[in-house]
Image (cartoon, rainbow, N blue to C red):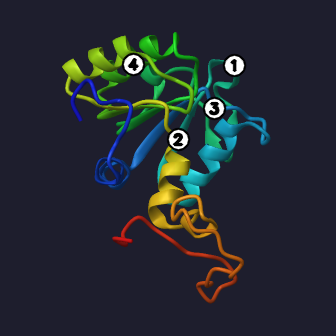
Amino acid sequence: MSGGHHDSYSNREIREILDSVRTIAVVGASPKSSRPSYFVTKYLMAKGYDVIPVNPGHAGKEIAGAKVYGSLSEIDRPVDMVDVFRNSEDAFGVTKDAIEIGAKVVWMQLGVRNDEAAKLAEEAGLTVVMNRCPKIEYGRLSGEIGWTGVNSKVLSSRRPGMSGRGFQNRSLKSDS
Protein backbone atom coordinates (compact mmCIF):
# COMPACT_ATOMS: atom_id res chain seq x y z
CA MET A 1 0.00 0.00 0.00
CA SER A 2 1.56 3.21 -1.03
CA GLY A 3 0.53 6.69 0.02
CA GLY A 4 -2.66 8.41 -0.95
CA HIS A 5 -5.23 5.69 -0.65
CA HIS A 6 -5.82 5.58 3.07
CA ASP A 7 -9.54 6.12 2.74
CA SER A 8 -10.16 2.55 1.61
CA TYR A 9 -8.31 -0.75 1.67
CA SER A 10 -9.10 -3.88 -0.28
CA ASN A 11 -9.94 -7.08 1.54
CA ARG A 12 -6.81 -8.60 -0.02
CA GLU A 13 -4.58 -5.86 1.44
CA ILE A 14 -6.02 -6.21 4.94
CA ARG A 15 -5.94 -10.03 4.80
CA GLU A 16 -2.29 -10.00 3.65
CA ILE A 17 -1.34 -7.81 6.61
CA LEU A 18 -3.22 -9.91 9.16
CA ASP A 19 -1.83 -13.13 7.66
CA SER A 20 1.77 -11.88 7.60
CA VAL A 21 2.15 -10.45 11.11
CA ARG A 22 2.68 -12.59 14.21
CA THR A 23 3.80 -10.09 16.86
CA ILE A 24 1.66 -7.04 17.54
CA ALA A 25 2.51 -4.24 19.98
CA VAL A 26 -0.63 -2.45 21.19
CA VAL A 27 0.44 1.08 22.12
CA GLY A 28 -2.07 2.54 24.54
CA ALA A 29 -3.28 -0.82 25.87
CA SER A 30 -5.45 -0.43 28.94
CA PRO A 31 -5.72 -2.76 31.94
CA LYS A 32 -9.44 -1.88 32.19
CA SER A 33 -11.46 -4.72 30.70
CA SER A 34 -14.16 -2.27 29.60
CA ARG A 35 -11.78 -0.39 27.28
CA PRO A 36 -11.59 -1.22 23.56
CA SER A 37 -7.79 -1.58 23.69
CA TYR A 38 -8.12 -4.32 26.33
CA PHE A 39 -10.75 -6.17 24.31
CA VAL A 40 -8.68 -5.93 21.10
CA THR A 41 -5.59 -7.17 22.98
CA LYS A 42 -7.46 -10.23 24.31
CA TYR A 43 -9.12 -10.94 20.97
CA LEU A 44 -5.87 -10.85 18.99
CA MET A 45 -4.22 -13.10 21.60
CA ALA A 46 -7.09 -15.57 21.22
CA LYS A 47 -6.46 -15.60 17.46
CA GLY A 48 -2.85 -16.71 18.01
CA TYR A 49 -0.98 -13.44 17.73
CA ASP A 50 1.84 -12.61 20.15
CA VAL A 51 0.40 -9.38 21.57
CA ILE A 52 2.58 -7.00 23.56
CA PRO A 53 0.80 -4.30 25.56
CA VAL A 54 2.62 -0.94 25.68
CA ASN A 55 1.60 1.55 28.36
CA PRO A 56 4.17 3.55 30.36
CA GLY A 57 1.82 3.88 33.34
CA HIS A 58 1.58 0.11 33.72
CA ALA A 59 5.09 -1.01 32.67
CA GLY A 60 6.17 -4.23 34.38
CA LYS A 61 2.60 -5.21 35.21
CA GLU A 62 0.29 -7.40 33.13
CA ILE A 63 -2.59 -6.67 30.80
CA ALA A 64 -4.66 -9.67 29.69
CA GLY A 65 -1.92 -11.93 31.04
CA ALA A 66 0.88 -10.34 29.00
CA LYS A 67 3.79 -8.30 30.34
CA VAL A 68 3.37 -4.57 29.76
CA TYR A 69 6.25 -2.54 28.35
CA GLY A 70 6.72 1.18 28.91
CA SER A 71 7.71 1.92 25.30
CA LEU A 72 8.28 0.19 21.99
CA SER A 73 12.06 0.46 22.44
CA GLU A 74 11.87 -1.64 25.63
CA ILE A 75 10.32 -4.67 23.92
CA ASP A 76 12.66 -7.65 24.01
CA ARG A 77 11.70 -9.26 20.69
CA PRO A 78 10.97 -8.22 17.11
CA VAL A 79 7.58 -6.56 16.48
CA ASP A 80 5.79 -7.01 13.15
CA MET A 81 2.93 -4.56 13.68
CA VAL A 82 2.30 -1.58 15.94
CA ASP A 83 -1.40 -1.02 16.70
CA VAL A 84 -1.85 2.64 17.71
CA PHE A 85 -4.50 3.18 20.40
CA ARG A 86 -3.51 6.82 20.88
CA ASN A 87 -4.91 10.03 19.46
CA SER A 88 -4.11 11.18 15.93
CA GLU A 89 -1.50 13.72 17.11
CA ASP A 90 0.38 11.07 19.12
CA ALA A 91 0.42 8.71 16.13
CA PHE A 92 3.39 10.56 14.61
CA GLY A 93 5.69 9.86 17.60
CA VAL A 94 4.50 6.26 17.83
CA THR A 95 5.19 5.86 14.11
CA LYS A 96 8.75 7.19 14.52
CA ASP A 97 9.28 4.64 17.32
CA ALA A 98 7.80 1.85 15.16
CA ILE A 99 10.30 2.67 12.41
CA GLU A 100 13.18 2.65 14.91
CA ILE A 101 12.32 -0.84 16.20
CA GLY A 102 11.97 -2.28 12.69
CA ALA A 103 8.21 -2.88 12.63
CA LYS A 104 6.70 -3.73 9.24
CA VAL A 105 3.22 -2.28 9.79
CA VAL A 106 1.75 0.74 11.57
CA TRP A 107 -1.96 0.26 12.16
CA MET A 108 -3.88 3.27 13.49
CA GLN A 109 -7.12 2.43 15.26
CA LEU A 110 -10.62 3.67 14.47
CA GLY A 111 -10.68 7.45 14.63
CA VAL A 112 -6.88 7.71 14.38
CA ARG A 113 -5.50 9.26 11.21
CA ASN A 114 -2.22 11.07 10.71
CA ASP A 115 -1.20 11.57 7.06
CA GLU A 116 2.21 12.95 8.04
CA ALA A 117 2.91 9.80 10.08
CA ALA A 118 1.70 7.61 7.21
CA LYS A 119 4.03 9.38 4.78
CA LEU A 120 6.98 8.98 7.17
CA ALA A 121 6.24 5.28 7.65
CA GLU A 122 5.77 4.56 3.97
CA GLU A 123 8.98 6.38 3.08
CA ALA A 124 10.71 4.05 5.56
CA GLY A 125 9.14 1.01 3.85
CA LEU A 126 6.35 0.27 6.34
CA THR A 127 2.77 -0.56 5.45
CA VAL A 128 0.17 1.77 6.95
CA VAL A 129 -3.48 1.30 7.83
CA MET A 130 -5.45 4.17 9.33
CA ASN A 131 -8.87 4.50 10.92
CA ARG A 132 -9.45 0.74 11.10
CA CYS A 133 -9.51 -1.87 13.87
CA PRO A 134 -7.63 -5.15 13.35
CA LYS A 135 -10.15 -6.98 15.55
CA ILE A 136 -13.06 -5.79 13.42
CA GLU A 137 -11.20 -6.48 10.19
CA TYR A 138 -10.19 -9.97 11.34
CA GLY A 139 -13.76 -10.73 12.36
CA ARG A 140 -15.16 -9.38 9.11
CA LEU A 141 -12.69 -11.23 6.87
CA SER A 142 -12.95 -14.50 8.80
CA GLY A 143 -16.75 -14.40 8.62
CA GLU A 144 -17.19 -14.13 12.39
CA ILE A 145 -19.20 -10.95 12.05
CA GLY A 146 -20.31 -11.38 8.45
CA TRP A 147 -23.14 -13.72 9.41
CA THR A 148 -24.82 -10.97 11.42
CA GLY A 149 -25.35 -8.88 8.31
CA VAL A 150 -22.46 -6.50 8.96
CA ASN A 151 -20.45 -7.78 6.00
CA SER A 152 -23.05 -9.58 3.92
CA LYS A 153 -25.58 -6.74 3.82
CA VAL A 154 -28.20 -9.44 4.48
CA LEU A 155 -29.85 -9.81 7.84
CA SER A 156 -31.21 -13.19 8.83
CA SER A 157 -32.89 -14.72 11.85
CA ARG A 158 -31.17 -18.05 11.15
CA ARG A 159 -28.51 -19.00 13.66
CA PRO A 160 -24.98 -19.51 12.35
CA GLY A 161 -23.56 -23.02 12.31
CA MET A 162 -21.31 -24.05 15.17
CA SER A 163 -17.99 -25.82 14.98
CA GLY A 164 -19.23 -28.71 17.11
CA ARG A 165 -17.55 -27.40 20.25
CA GLY A 166 -20.25 -24.91 21.15
CA PHE A 167 -18.69 -21.87 19.49
CA GLN A 168 -17.72 -20.61 16.09
CA ASN A 169 -14.19 -21.36 15.05
CA ARG A 170 -13.22 -19.08 12.19
CA SER A 171 -9.87 -18.04 10.81
CA LEU A 172 -8.52 -15.90 8.00
CA LYS A 173 -7.27 -18.95 6.13
CA SER A 174 -10.58 -19.48 4.32
CA ASP A 175 -11.18 -17.53 1.14
CA SER A 176 -14.78 -16.70 2.06
Between marks 4 and 2 in the image, the one whose residue lies nearer the viewer: 2
Q: Residues within 10 Å of mark 2 (few under 14, many from 20)?
A: many
Q: Are marks 4 and 2 in contact (CB under 8 Å)?
A: no
Helix or strand or loop: what does disc 2 sit on? loop
Which circle's residue, 1 or 3, is located before the other in the chain? 3
Between marks 2 and 1 in the image, the one whose residue lies nearer the viewer: 2
Residue annotated with mark 4: 95
Q: Are marks 4 and 3 in contact (CB under 8 Å)?
A: no
Numbered tag placed on residue 137 in the rendering:
none
Helix or strand or loop: what does disc 1 sit on? helix
Residue annotated with mark 3: 29
Say what amino acid the circle numbered 2 marks: Cys
Q: Residues within 10 Å of mark 4 (few under 14, many from 20)?
A: many
Q: Is residue 145 left or right of residue 9?
A: right
> Is residue 63 in view from this perspective?
no
Residue annotated with mark 2: 133
User: Residue 120: image x %, image y %?
Assistant: 28, 14
